[in-house]
Amino acid sequence: MLSEQQIGITLLRARERTDPGSYPRFDSVMYQTTPSRKEIDFVGGGWMDGVPFESKYVDGAWRRDARTATNAYDGVAVLATRSVLDNEGRARAVPAPILALMLEP
């Protein structure tokens, strides 16, 4: 849960830098429930360029955890992990602390 909060706050800060005053409008970083009743953590509407973010603090089976996001979107999905770094395929795994640093200025 802490990883998910860290990524959510970092996405809100990134949104604030591009659209000053948007920080209180947390709906700019929203989750989505799929027709199969699975949740994608952060979809953010148009400003995230259609790239969903999922936070699963795991090292193994991360591709399975990313499947919901990659199935719901045609492009790339980003999965914040504990320590896995993998940029092959449609699901990109990045350790949560590194992802947070990459999203900061």
Image: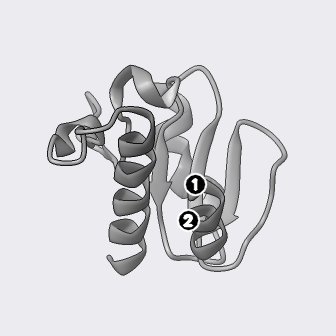
Task: Identify which residue, 83 or 99, lies in the foreground.
Answer: 99
- The answer to whether 59 appears left or right of 40 in the picture is right
Residue at left offset 34%, top offset 61%: 9
Residue type (three-letter) at the residue carrying disc 1:
Leu
**Which quadrant is the C terminus positioned in?**
bottom right
Give residue 22's position: percent from left, percent from top.
Answer: 24, 38
- The answer to whether 70 appears left or right of 2 in the picture is right
Residue at left offset 48%, top offset 47%: 53
Mark seen at residue 103: 1
Query: In this figure, which residue is indicated by the disc labeled 2?
Result: 100
Q: Looking at the image, is 21 positioned above or below residue 105?
A: above
Label 2 Cα crowd, 10 Å radius (few <14 / some 14-19 / many 20+): some
The quarter of the picture where residue 30 lies is top left
Residue type (three-letter) at the residue carrying disc 2:
Ala
Residue at left offset 44%, top offset 34%: 18
Give residue 23's position: percent from left, percent from top.
Answer: 24, 47
Residue that lies at the very extreme toward the left in this rendered image? 24
Task: Identify which residue, 42 or 9, lies in the foreground.
Answer: 9
Residue at left offset 26%, top offset 36%: 28
Give residue 15's position: percent from left, percent from top.
Answer: 39, 41
Tell me the SS state at disc 1.
Answer: helix
